[in-house]
Amino acid sequence: MSILCYHGIALDDEDQWLGHLFISRARFERRLELLRQFGANVLPLGEAVERLHRGSLPPRSVTITFDDGFVDSYVHALPLLGKFGFPSTLYLTTHYCRHRLPVFNLIVNYVLWKSGKSTIELRKFGLPGVASIRNYGERQAVVTSLLRYSEARGMGSAAKDEIVRSIAEDCGVDYNRILRARLLQLMTPDEVGAAARSGMDMELHTHRHRTPRDRELFTKEIRDNAACIREFTGREPVHFCYPSGDYDPRFFGWLKESGVRTATTCEPGLAAAGTEPYRLPRMLDDSVATEVDFERWLSGFRI
Ligand SMILES: [Zn+2]
């Protein structure tokens, strides 16, 4: 069984910025067409994993999953999935659902990319000297420094957003336009509820998109995440996806005691009846994978 993994369907030019996380709407629609042509049996995740372990899956079984819960999952993915009649699962991280702000570490990187500059000077935010921002990794080093700066000062989401606004203004990037377009923002609680009623199951991805190695902190992430999902959808989430694919075997027991039945990773592969339920592999589809790659995944050739 193939469990497909998507992050975002670009609202603007996010696929050109970060092609391994975002794909264009047209490309996503084409993937759904390929699934139909292939005769894929697109199943809800819960049904698929249950039948996987019972050995009763139909041939060409596929499950479609999304990570995080960006606005575009609601704006682009949901209507397209509805058009094809495909169910899906969204692993929702809930902290930013209550904030009408973009996710800090992503928006900083995006704004730096959007500036078109090769270097930046951010002494006022604690960065020494001039930093190179020519590629994703260099920009991410700036993000890491800014995260350290904001954490040392105990800044909340609103204060961190002021940093982003300041950087955007200094770089000549129109931040108000980015906010209006809702780039890199998560769905609102109302949108989450509406999506859940339209066949997009909401499952766990931690409240703050992190996996602490401390049992109490880890299980609190699950509890906070589950409480929000219950509140937004009226349903109990029981499946989990490791944020950033970061997992540790000691999590398996902590997930089990939290009532979680399965967990997916970002490791490529096909799920089989004997696969460890807390380490289900997925196929990460992105702007780089070709249609040939995609068809090979569906046929089970590329593992
Ligand atoms: Zn994630």
Image: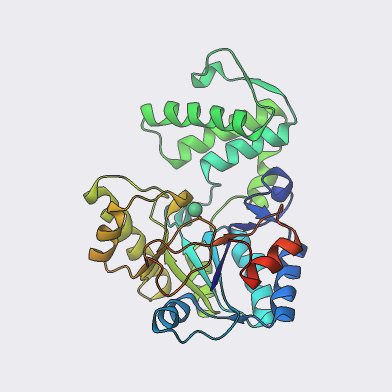
Which residue is depicted at the point 54% across and 16% down?
A: 123
State the residue at coordinates (22%, 50%): 216
Relative to 169, 88 lies left or right:
left
Image vertical order of residue 178 relative to residue 238, above or below: above
Q: Is residue 77 above or below residue 18?
A: below
Q: Where residue 258 sits in the image (x, y, percent)? A: 26, 64
Which residue is depicted at the point 70% across and 61% down? 293
At 44% from the left edge and 79% from the top edge, which residue is drawn?
52
- Tell me if 264 is positioned left or right of 128 in this view: left
The picture quadrant where one finds residue 93 is bottom left
The residue lying toward the viewer, choosing from 146 and 219, is 219
Q: In this view, does 156 lie above or below 255?
A: above
Give the residue at the far front of this rendering: 301
Q: In this view, does 263 lie to the left or right of 129?
A: left
Which quarter of the picture shows residue 187?
A: bottom right
Count the marks: how many? 0
Coordinates of residue 29 in the picture (x, y in percent): 73, 69
Residue 253 x, y percent position in the rendering: 25, 60
* Residue 49: quadrant of the picture: bottom left
Comparing 31 with 105, the one in front is 31
Q: Quadrant of the C terminus?
A: bottom right
Q: What colour scheme governs how the chains and residues are painted in the rendered image of this protein? A: rainbow
Residue 85, image x and y in percent?
64, 83
